[in-house]
Image (cartoon, coloured by chain):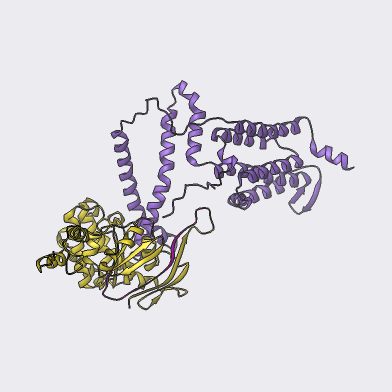
Chain colours: A yellow, B purple
Amino acid sequence: MSIEVKDLTYTYSPKTPYAATALKGVSLHIEEGEYVGIIGKTGSGKSTFIQHLNALIRLQSGEIKVYDIDLNAKKPDLKKLRGTVGMVMQYPEYQLFDETVEKDVAYGPRNIGLSEGEIKERVREAIELVGLDFEEIRDRSPFELSGGQKRRVAIAGVIAMRPRVLVLDEPIAGLDPKGKQEILALVKKLKNAFSPTVIVVSHDMDSVAENCDKVALFADGEIARFASPREVFYDDELLARTEMDCPSVVKVVKELDKLGVSLPTRPVTKSELVAALTKGGRDE
Amino acid sequence: MNNIVFGQYYPSGSVVHRLDPRVKLVMVLLYIISVFFVVDYAMYGALFLFVIAVALMSKVPLRVLFRTVRTIVVLVLITAIINLFFTQGDEMLFSWKFIHIYKEGVERAIKLALRLILLMLFPSLLTLTTTPMELTDAIESLLSPLKLIKVPVHAIALIMSIALRMIPILMEETNKIILAQKARGADFDTGGALKKAKAMIPVLVPLFVGAFRRADELALAMDARCYSSVATRTKYKVMHLALRDLVASLFCMAVFALVFLNKYLWPFDEMILSLWR
């Protein structure tokens, strides 16, 4: 088990006129190796939830355990936690600050107290993993790079800490289709390299359906459903209630259904759809 | 993140909140002038009652209002102590080596402390019940006669309102960057002053880059909508004087008039003392 959350409740600015409850009794188990998608409309508590995983938000009530780190402990080992859970924020390119790409990527590893040799090795590895040429880019200023390159450098800055859990908050927001595909492929590559557990917050249902093993659907600070994409995206009542859209593959299946074409399986990914169609699902 | 109006605005929708901001601003200015003319303890007491009465009407908890005094506690204490020791008078109360405390010194220390606290309270009530935007509009409206002597009042007001508008945005951005760097293991809380200052660099650099980017985007957006500072423009929220503004002004002015009557005609303290005797 890599992440265990029990009965998490959080209120912003408690005891003021601005008090707003963001999470109401959220419980979740995430196993090592799972690729979890977090969906839900704006303000449903997704960001508040993932910020808890890295102790960026102080626990108000509830329990969180990440591997053997207990966040309910009096003084949880934050350095260890932040090395374990790598958090890629929304628009991570806005967090770049140092003179050179190499120094910027080294910021995280240096903060968790690694040796210089180890830092150098990890920085090279991280920059190469995100698909950039280390020798070419190491001495350039992060501010002179293109948007896509900046985002890659920022992601490299997080994965250089070799987190066992990688959390990404809308990693493909604001990218062109090619950029989106590249980042999604990168996340897959990272999952295989050293972050077996991946948690992605996304508004892009297609990418969630395509990549995730499980989907946590947030609505009004609660988890409305935590199940496989198939169970979530074929539950019309649930999607309507939480004002969510279904992925295009599911839309195609529904249109086919209207035309009287029923498929033998319930596909959620493109390859599943193709398989279902080619294996002759034409029952008249 | 929660969307907080910058400053200490305390929303309660009371009648004080709904007063015309221009009226509130002028009344606060008159109040500040009046406070300097208060001489009697009785008048200090009356002004305290006045402030508390307005606070009750505004539905801002007194606890919140008096919290603003905390910021000037040190100033009040230092002023009081200096006046206590360095005021000379006729009636010596206490003397030890070079320290001489006179009756006048005690009186001055108490009155100055009261004056400072009063000066803090009422203007705080203004910022507690008025949003910064309303204040900017009020200032623009009150300064508009200066247009006659070619002061760019509108541009000044625009700069003020953009600055005010940007503060919460930049604060939110700062929070986001702090979280992002914390997630990368940044430590802002331990170490000496130099280490802490250095730890802020990864926050300040992206913040400045972001601020310039935003300023650039805003200028472009304004240009795209043909913004011109010389054009005569209308307001989204037009300020109107209502009956409540008249009532509030008369009430405040009556109190301020009392201050001047007290100073020049009716010495309350002597009157009370003579009654007591």
Q: Which quarter of the figure has residue A56?
A: bottom left
Q: Which quarter of the figure has residue A25?
A: bottom left
Q: Which quarter of the figure has residue B51?
A: top right
Residue A138 in sight in this render: no
Left or right of B32: which side holds A223? left
* Magenta highlight range: A18-36
Measuring 72% from the left and 42% from the top, which residue is drawn there?
Answer: B44
Measuring 31% from the left and 49% from the top, which residue is drawn there?
Answer: B209
Q: Quadrant of the N terminus of chain B?
A: bottom left
Q: Is residue B21 above or below residue B112?
A: above
Left or right of B182: which side holds A124? left
Residue B81 on image: x %, y %:
68, 50
Task: In the displayed orientation, state which residue is furthest to the front.
Answer: A284
Left or right of B227: which side holds B31? right
Q: Answer whether residue B254 is magenta in the image.
A: no
Taking depth in this image into account, of A112 and A131 the one nearest to the observer is A131
Q: Is residue B108 above or below residue B201?
A: above
Residue A284 on image: x %, y %:
13, 64
Magenta-colored segment: predominant secondary structure = strand
Residue A199 on image: x %, y %:
29, 67
Residue B161 on image: x %, y %:
43, 38
Taking depth in this image into account, of B165 and A224 the one nearest to the observer is A224
Left or right of A119: which side holds A178? left
Q: Quadrant of the C terminus of chain B?
A: top right
Residue A208 in sight in this render: yes
Taking depth in this image into account, of B195 and B230 the one nearest to the observer is B230
Task: In the displayed orientation, state which residue is furthest to the top.
Answer: B148
Measuring 38% from the left and 76% from the top, which residue is drawn there?
Answer: A69
Q: Is residue B68 above or below residue B23?
A: below
